[in-house]
Structure formats: structure tokens, C-alpha cells
Image: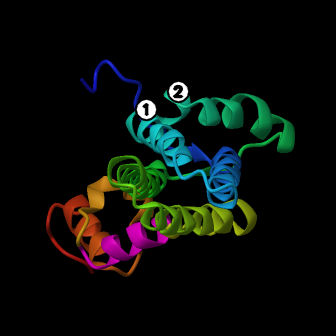
Amino acid sequence: MSRLLPRFPNPVNEVAARTVAAGVAIVAALAIGLGQPWLSSVLAYGFLARVLAGPTLSPLGQLATRVVAPRVCARPRMVPGPPKRFAQAIGATLTVAAAVADLGFGAQAVATALLGVVGVAATLEATLGFCLGCQIFARLMAWGLLPPDVCLACADLGGPAARALRSAASGGAGER
């Protein structure tokens, strides 16, 4: 199946990622503010599409990468893709859970709370460039819970992931 779908981009244009986050924040706010948590299914589709194929299958991703980002910033700011994909996966998990809570069980309060978390995280990304999912990804790498080859560009210079990378690069001879 992975051969049928485009790959998640690596690196990722940070300007486009922040634009997508702004769109997510707006839709989450509308869902909560208008009392329409069913919009979580719209968000869930977008997150799942972006996890599977980057912006290719996501209308919001297409708008961000093809229309908004090129007009906002002539020069893209490229960042590693794996942490962004991890963040999208967290968003997918929360919005799918919100959709199931609301549409499957009528638990609008649960759906609203989950959408609130997504909205806050998306707002942090859109306004401050602070990617909560990326920070979690970095902690998991620093603790050695993600192998270094998941994101070579992300390996912390002093952490276990970087030591493992340096050891592998030197043929297992270790650090000097």
C-alpha cells in the first residue's frame, strides 16, 4: 500500500506546516464555538491524509503548500519531516477519538475536550512555531525510545541517539 501513496515529505516547509496548523486551529475553534464537534471528522480526514501522504491528499495541505505558503514567504524554511509526521499522527489520533466520541457515542463533552487540545496545539504551532508533537518526538529520541535512523537530522548531539549514530558511523568503535 505504501507504494500506492506518495511519501511524507522530508524535509517539510515550516511555513506550509504553520499554515496548515492555522487552518486546523480555525476549524477546531469553529467546531467548539458553534457546538459542531462533528467537524472533528473533517479534521480527522485531513490529519490521516497528511500522515499517509503529506499534503498530497489533504485539501488544507494543498491550500497551504500551493497557495498560501508561497505568497506568505518566498523562501521556504525547511525542517525535518519525521517530527512533523509524528505531530500529524497525534492530531489524527485525537481527532479520530473526538469523531468516535461524538458520532459514535454522543459524548460531545469528550469530543469538545479533545478538539480543544488539538486547537491549542495547532494555535501554538501557527502563532509561535512551537510544535508540541515535535517536542514530544524530540524527547522520545533523547530518551532513546525512537531509533536514531527515524530522523538522522533530529539526533541530539549529546543524547543517546546521537551517540548511537556516531558509533554506527565509526564502525562501532565508539566515541573518541
CB contact under 8 Å: marks 2 and 1: yes
Q: Residue at x 61, y 69 (%)?
A: 120
The answer to whether 2 appears left or right of 49 in the picture is: left
Specify few, some or many for label 1: CA neighbours under 10 Å numbering under 14, 14-19, or 20 or more: some
Q: Residue at x 77, y 30 (%)?
A: 67
Q: Is residue 129 magenta?
A: no
Q: Splitting the image into 4 quarters, where does residue 8 fall?
A: top left
Q: Which mark is residue 100?
A: none
Residue range corresponding to the magenta coloring: 133-144
The answer to whether 36 appears left or right of 9 in the picture is: right
The answer to whether 103 appears left or right of 13 in the picture is: left
Q: Nearer the viewer, residue 138 or 131?
A: 131
Which secondary structure class fits the magenta region best? helix
Q: Residue furthest front?
A: 106
Q: Residue at x 85, y 43 (%)?
A: 72
Residue position marked by numbered label 1 in the rendering: 53
Q: Nearer the viewer, residue 98 or 158?
A: 98
- Amino acid on which the number 1 mark rests in the picture: Ala
Q: CA distance from mark 2 to mark 1?
A: 6 Å
Q: Position of residue 136 (x, y in %)?
A: 41, 72
Q: Splitting the image into 4 quarters, where does residue 39 fall?
A: top right
Q: Residue furthest top?
A: 4
Residue position marked by numbered label 2 in the rendering: 56
Secondary structure of residue under mark 2: helix
Q: How is the image coloured?
A: rainbow
Compared to residue 20, the image places residue 134 above or below, namely: below
Quarter of the figure with the C terminus: bottom left
Compared to residue 98, the image places residue 137 above or below, namely: below
Quarter of the figure with the N terminus: top left
Q: Position of residue 28 (x, y in %)?
A: 62, 55
Q: How many marks?
A: 2
Q: Residue at x 78, y 37 (%)?
A: 68
